Image (cartoon, grey):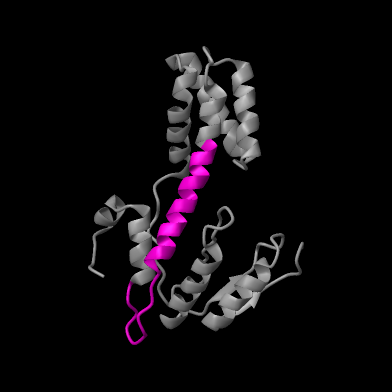
Amino acid sequence: MTEQSPEGDRKKSFWQRSWEILNAPIPGTPNFGMDRAFLGQLTDRLQATRQVLFDKVKNLVKGRSKLDEELLEELEELLLESDMGVEVTQKAIAHLRQQAKHAGLSPDDITTTLADHLKKCLGPPSWLQFEPGQGLQVIILVGVNGTGKTTTIGKLAWRYTAAGCKVIIAAADTFRAAAIDQIAVWADRAGVQLIRHKEGG
């Protein structure tokens, strides 16, 4: 992988940087990387999740002539049902209410304004940097089902073990069926320790 400046890294897309991280060669180890087909599936699934949410928002505001409290309450309910989270949803609704009051926001503007607000909440993506000997460092993977978290954990564990790091995986998903068993398989393949609890714990 060609060395890049931090400024150059920030200009790259999230997927491009992720691809480079997971495919950077480790001296003295076999080639290891993420399958391009898998990365494409991951992108498609995230796109589908995003599209479903914003299609719901578009359907909600369709035919509305004004952004009133009734519409905001319905939107709040929709976001909560979509697992947006209480705090994030409340801040999003407050932002839309403020924009409606000061900038004359219309129902047709909600989708774009909401998307822009959520992007700002996420902030810029950060560069994943791990080096042996830097002490305890933690990576937490979160996301909707089916986006490849478990597979990525296994690959990261293998990669950092091969680079000389001591890796421990903690199985935090105790509710999805067979989630712990799946991460246990990847921990075994990577040769790393697994911290686990009983299902439903």
In magenta, the rendered stretch is 24-53
**Does the magenta stretch mainly form a helix, a strand or a loop?**
helix
Q: Is residue 90 visible?
A: yes
At 46% from the left and 44% from the top, the residue drawn is 122
Q: Is residue 187 magenta?
A: no
Which quadrant: the C terminus? bottom right
Above or below residue 3? Residue 97 is above
| Apparent side of residue 34 relative to residue 79 in the rendered image (left or right) | left
| Apparent side of residue 190 relative to residue 125 in the rendered image (left or right) | right
Q: Is residue 46 magenta?
A: yes
Residue 100 locus on image (x, y percent):
49, 17
Q: Nearer the viewer, residue 141 or 138?
A: 141
Q: Residue furthest bottom?
A: 28
Residue 86 locus on image (x, y percent):
64, 38
Q: Is residue 137 visible?
A: no
Above or below residue 79? Residue 46 is below
Q: How many marks?
A: 0
Residue 154 locus on image (x, y percent):
52, 73
Above or below residue 27? Residue 72 is above
At 49% from the left and 52% from the top, the residue drawn is 45
Q: Nearer the viewer, residue 153 or 81?
A: 81
Residue 175 locus on image (x, y percent):
72, 60
| Apparent side of residue 123 relative to residue 180 in the rendered image (left or right) | left
Which quadrant: the N terminus? bottom left
Picture quarter containing residue 142? bottom right
At 40% from the left and 69% from the top, the residue drawn is 34
